[in-house]
Amino acid sequence: MNDATQEDKELLQISELSRPQRRVLGVLLEKAFTTPDQYPLTLKAVTTGCNQKSNRDPISNYSETQVYETLESLRELGLVAVIHSDSGRTERYRHYMRHRFNFTEPQLAILTELWLRGRQTMGELRGRASRMVPIETLEQLRAEFKGLLDQKYVQSNGSIERRGIEVDHNWYKESEGKALGFDSSADSEPEETRPAPTPAPVATVNNASSDLGALQEAVERLQSDNQQLSQQIASMADVVEQLQQQLADLKQELGS
């Protein structure tokens, strides 16, 4: 095996990133999805994206020096590259996630959202990730999420078929202690602790169960759609904020 092939194999095994690395990489991915005309990003734009108030948890206050050092560490991992402009005066940065991993576009959006905001419900995740890549239903989200779950890139605190469970990425450093406890009690209750079933007309039970399930699905869809709308509004606010920053930079360069 030649050195290049061995290097690629090692890069593909990356499964832990520091908090600054996750934030910076998440910003590069997010902006590539949502504002492609402004991508790749300058150091200042990456720093602004890391510290913006919307779509971030926790809110950070990284300096350009910290962001630069983080970008350099990601370059060493082969996850980020520097792009030089035609004038050669400004360096811009882009992610190399598609080069290093075989993730689908929805899976990249899922990881991006989890890196930027951390633990959340599946409904919240669908609404937020959909601002980057269309994810029409929770069933589609579950299918994409399961692919990541099988590779241990994400985690959940219960079966992803359950309503109301929480999910997170699984790229934490071991020292962060962010593993979600898997609660299987709601999936399979021990036989001896289950109450004795109360006889009831089969048709009544089936109809009630069907109606309740349909109602829960409808509520979950509404919550997800509302979350998606909120994220779209937040994304528009991000674009306005970036344009204002660019205008301020331009005025400063012109000496006005």
Image (spheres, rainbow, N blue to C red):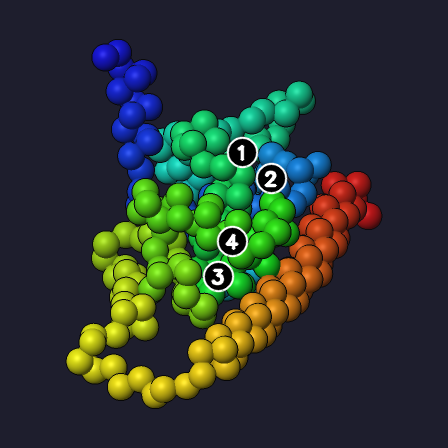
CA gap between label 4 and label 2 equals 25 Å
| Residue depicted at 33% across the width and 64% down the height | 158
Instruction: Decide which of 151, 239 is in the foreground and name it.
Output: 151
Q: Which mark is nearer the camera, 1 or 2?
A: 2
Amino acid type of the residue tagged 3 in the rendering: Met
Which comes sooner in the sequence, label 3 or label 1? 1
Question: What residue sits right under mark 2 in the picture?
Answer: 32
Identify whether 37 is placed above or below 149. above
Q: Residues within 10 Å of mark 4 (few under 14, many from 20)?
A: few
Q: N-terminal of the two: label 2 or label 3?
A: 2
Q: Position of residue 186 (x, y in %)?
A: 32, 73
Q: Is residue 191 above or below residue 28?
A: below
Residue 111 in view, yes or no: no
Figure check: 215 above or below 160? below
Label 1: how many Cα within 10 Å (few below 14, some 14–19, many 20+): many
Mark 3 Cα shell of 10 Å, populated few (<14), some (14-19), many (≥20): many
Mark whose residue sits in front, 4 or 2: 4
Q: Earlier in the sequence, mark 4 or mark 2?
A: 2
Residue matched to label 4: 139
Crowding at dot 2, Cα within 10 Å, few <14 / some 14-19 / many 20+, comes out as some
Q: Is residue 147 left or right of residue 87?
A: left
Residue at the disc numbered 3: 122
Instruction: Please tell me which residue is depicted at 71% across the width and 51% down the height of the picture.
Output: 239
User: Which amino acid, by three-letter code, is at mark 2?
Assistant: Ala
Residues at discs 1 and 2 in contact (Cβ within 8 Å): yes
Depth check, front residue: 165 or 239: 165
The residue type indicated by label 4 comes to Glu
N-terminal of the pair, mark 1 or mark 2, is: 2
* Residue that label 1 marks: 94
Q: Secondary structure at mark 1?
A: strand
Mark 4 and mark 1: span between their CA atoms? 31 Å
